[in-house]
Image: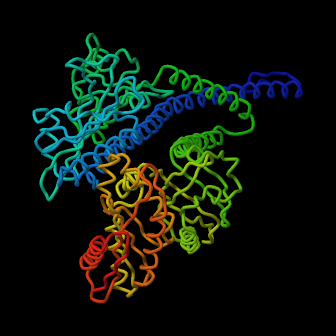
Amino acid sequence: MKDIFGFKNLSSSTVGKRYYWLFTLFFLLFGSLVAVITSLINYNIQYTNIESEIREKVAAEKAIKYELLSEFIQHAQNVVRAIAGSEFTHRYVSTGSAESHHNLNLLLHAATVSNNAFMQLRFIDSTGMESVRVERIEGLDMPLIIDKKRLQNKRDRYYFKEAALLSEGEYWHSKFDLNMEHGRIEIPIRPTFRIATPVFSQNQFSGLIIANISIDTLLSTVGTSSDFDIYIIDREGEFILHPSYALAWSRYLPDRSNVFTQFPQFGASVSELKDSRKAGHFTFSVSEIFMNDDEAFVMAVPRKSLLAKFRKNNMLTAGLTALTVLMVSFILSGLVAIIPARLQRKLSDAYFKIKNYAEIINRYVITSSTDRAGHILSTSAALSEVYGFSAQEMKGKKHNIVKHPDTPAETHRDIWRTILKGKTWHGEIKDKAKNGESFWLNHVITPDFDDKGKIVGFTSVSHDITDKKEIERLSVTDTLTGLSNRRRLDDLFSHEFDRFNRYERQFAMILLDVDHFKQVNDKFGHKVGDRVLIEMGRLLALNVRKNDLLGRWGGEEFLLICPETSLDGAIKLAEKIRQIIEVTDFSEVGRVTASFGVTVSIKDDSDEAMFVRADKALYMAKRDGRNCVVHLTL
């Protein structure tokens, strides 16, 4: 008998063995076929994933570059805006005095010193004439304030004409170019970008603040990437940034190719490139950051090493999948094998997305998480960089290890009251780093809940605002004595006067003037006079009470606002200070005296009337022979 498989006259054991080997061969062929098909499918899926993974990397690069460029431009704009709105700028515009010109020089010099990228910072008045210019000179460590004789009229320069048309609060951005010296490009080249904003006084254009900024370091940082060649291209296809430094700035330097000669596959139209992908080249615009005529955009080209790595991983994954499927095909059906492969692919995609986003957050966002008691569970690398503590050093500790002594305890109590109620706290806090340096952070602290709605911890996300706070401090500080300036005193007085009107909390005002100060200047010189004012400011600061508000009112006059103080208390305090000044030896000039005018807030008073009383009392003290205290209440 011959069966359907062609076996005839064989023993059952032999036939059984033949069937065993036949079906073994059948399953081996079936398993091999399943393995081959699965490998091909997986290879195609992985090949598609290469495209997806490259796009994810491009998205990460774009996020990093956007953040870097945006922060750079925002910081530069904040500086010129702070200067344009500064009291020193407006005082110079309104008075044009030598003192206000000197103070404006110091303000622009301080801003240039604190911003290493600033090559030049100027105030140009409404006629186009440079009033102040601060420059970084090659070979010098510190910027220089340019002598008045070397200042020039810029009314015919394009940047003055364009920036002068801006409304208050607007900014003008120049094109990217190379710094020129005597009509020629400076060698070595110095990539430059300019930002300007107008200054208005009484709704009239009074000039503009303009900063020449070196962007060499910025472009170098933007061009840094482990996976892509980074280009920055203008609207006409010229290279601003090129992976090869010798090919950048093709608009300005000879014998350098543009994007159309280096990448002929794009034809001759830049519009085809913007925010698109073609032939493995990814682009995105940055013109909303740099608001100029360049209409610049970034092009990221994946490196061959990145593609080779993806292809190698692709082949390895396909081979391992084939071997795995072949091994399990004797037990499991092909359908079951497909389900885990799909799940694995989705999980892998999700994992790499989360990993990339987490890495970006870890490197560039200042974050930390704590348990309910405030013990630190984790910190980002960005936080460690700011605080100077490693993640291991901070783990298990509380945030009071970075608490600054200047930060009021009430601030921290307010934080805990808010977040323990399940609400988000937002505010600015002064902290200190491991090395003792102070800095300011803007914090957003949010409670973390479990699935039952119970608070189990807290997450803090912050960003560094130290530069902003320093500009704010400079705007309310007298540059000579370090005390509060007149602008700050006006705010403090207004606050105290409002409190008096609302709660009838009487306060006092003491206005003092250094006697015969003009004689000090005439006899010893203005520099010695300045040192006398500095010593006077220190002496006053050491002898006023903790809650008293002290500042330099102007010239040789100082103002003291005393909250919760009666007339008798103010007179006693003024007399105490007068006696201390009288017996103090001032370096280089010896003994100095001061006259005091004292008054207090009274019912139905006005702020102007109170100032007039204090000034009148001071005048009477001068008239009565100086070195005395005179008070007025009516």
Q: Position of residue 381 (x, y in %)?
A: 59, 44
**What residue appears at the point 51 percent right and 48 percent down from the top-left corner?**
365
Determine the image quadrant of residue 388: top right
Viewed as shown, does residue 312 lie left or right of 333?
A: left
**Front-lying residue, 334 or 263:** 263
**What residue appears at the point 31 percent right and 37 percent down from the top-left corner?**
286
Furthest-front residue in this view? 625
| Vertical comparison of 97 with 491: above or below | above
Furthest-bottom residue in this view? 603
Q: Quadrant of the C terminus?
A: bottom left
Q: Position of residue 467 (x, y in %)?
A: 42, 48
Q: Position of residue 218 (x, y in %)?
A: 40, 32
Viewed as shown, does residue 375 lie left or right of 14?
A: left
Looking at the picture, the colour scheme in use is rainbow
Q: Position of residue 502 (x, y in %)?
A: 35, 85
**Front-lying residue, 25 or 63:** 63
**What residue appears at the point 47 percent right and 63 percent down from the top-left corner?**
541
**Front-lying residue, 89 or 576:** 576
Count of labels in the image? 0
| Vertical comparison of 355 with 298: above or below | below
Q: Quadrant of the N terminus?
A: top right
**Front-lying residue, 468 or 252:** 468
Determine the image quadrant of residue 534: bottom left
